[in-house]
Amino acid sequence: EQLCINYTNETLQQQFNRYVFKLEQEEYAREEIKWSFVEFPDNQDCLDLIEGGRKETPPDGGLLAMLDDECRLPRGSDANYAARILKSLGSRPRLAASKKQVVDGIFEVRHYAGPVPYVANGFLEKNKDELPKAASDLFAAARSGAPFIGAICDAFDHAAEAAAAALASSTKKASAKKKVTVGSQFKAQLRRLMTTVSTTTPHYVRCLKPNDENVPSKFDRKRVAEQLRYGGVLEAVRVARSGFPVRMPHAEFLAHYAALGAWADRTAGLKGCARLVETFASARPTFDAASAQLGKTKVFLRKGAHDALETARSAARRAAAVRCQATFRAAAAGS
């Protein structure tokens, strides 16, 4: 169970990394702006270790694939599974085991949140998750007389069929007779979840545990800092600080800051944006022109540059409003 939980955490962490780090940097590169790339932790190698399925993975696959194979062998055992893992994947930097752990059938996976030891004892039995024949017969007999039980059985059959289809598509020697295991079902369900998540605009909520004693009014700074670090929050803050959180298409940028002067031609495109930034920077020695980068289709602004432009825009609009009021009042007084 813990391996499946940590497998999910690794997958969600990669999605977080991809959304916050990779896509951010890819857009900067695509727009060809000047920006120093930030190194961020990528856990793809840990996912390869668990699920396999990539060219870098040994022919035997990852931890889950090896577990399924061991479950199908007539003489498969937990000890053989642990030995097979260390033999095929022992050179992987994410996998480790001391001599004592090897003897005890323990392997250690270095997850993004830290190393976790797994005891192979009981892995095969839990992965098979065989339902006793008496229970199967009972559920089959209850289908017709109990709609609720029938709906549960149908949902289980649907999940098993989906897992079997995913297994068949991911293995070259797939067979319809292969029994669906807990690992293959979990892997298929997780893939469907990530397919759904990838079509959305995610918002992340990080839950932090203030102390390990579960008591109120106690804040362990070191423990919280570890959670922020392992959860990728500190890296996200670092990227946000070094990047450009505000970005606008050229036309929108020119239209938004048209109040700053006559040079803000809304139809000038990239040249108009460059002229606006250069003129604005030359009039304000404290303004850092490098904090406003011009991309192929967008203008990228750091927080300081955005605040300076917004302050100047608000002042220009207020001044324009005062001039309009003065002109109207003078005209009204003259009439």
Image (cartoon, rainbow, N blue to C red):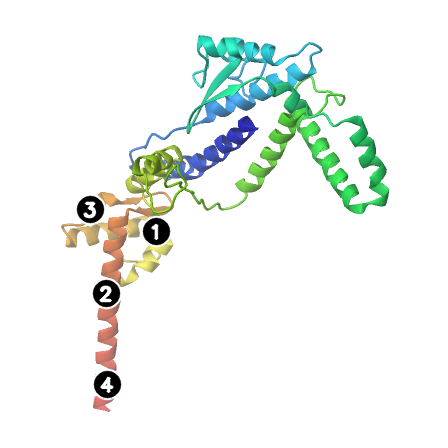
Question: Amino acid type of disc 3?
Answer: Asp
Characterize the local packing of mark 1: few (<14), some (14-19) or many (20 or more) Cα atoms within 10 angstroms: some
- Among the two numbered marks 2 and 1 on one chain, the one whose residue lies closer to the N terminus: 1
Q: Amino acid at mark 2?
A: Ala
Where in the figure is residue 51, as x and y percent of width and height? Answer: 56, 23
The 10 Å Cα crowd at callout 4, few under 14, some 14 to 19, many 20 or more, is: few
Q: Given this view, does label 4 or label 3 mark the residue nearer the observer?
A: 3
Q: CA distance from mark 2 to mark 1?
A: 22 Å
For label 3, the residue is 288
Q: Residue 150 versus residue 16: which sits nearer the camera?
A: 150
Residue at image position (37%, 55%) is 252
Determine which of the numbered discs, if any, sits on residue 331 in the image. Answer: 4
Residue holding disc 1: 269
Residue at the spot 60% in from the left edge and 20% down from the top edge: 123
Expressed as whole percent of the image width and height from the top left, the position of residue 223 reads 34, 35
Instruction: Return the disc, 1 or 4, that comes first in the chain's sequence.
Output: 1
Amino acid identity at mark 1 = Gly
Q: Nearer the viewer, mark 1 or mark 4?
A: 4
Disc 4/disc 2 C-alpha distance (Å): 22 Å
- Callout 2: few (<14), some (14-19), or many (20+) C-alpha neighbours within 10 Å? some
Q: Which residue is mark 2?
A: 316
What amino acid does circle 4 point to? Ala
Mark in the foreground, 4 or 2: 2
Q: Position of residue 131 (x, y in %)?
A: 74, 28
Proximity of marks 4 and 2: CB atoms separated by less than 8 Å: no
Residue 69 pos. (x, y %): 65, 16
Depth check, mark 3 against mark 1: the one in front is 3
**Side (left or right) of 111 relative to 165:** left
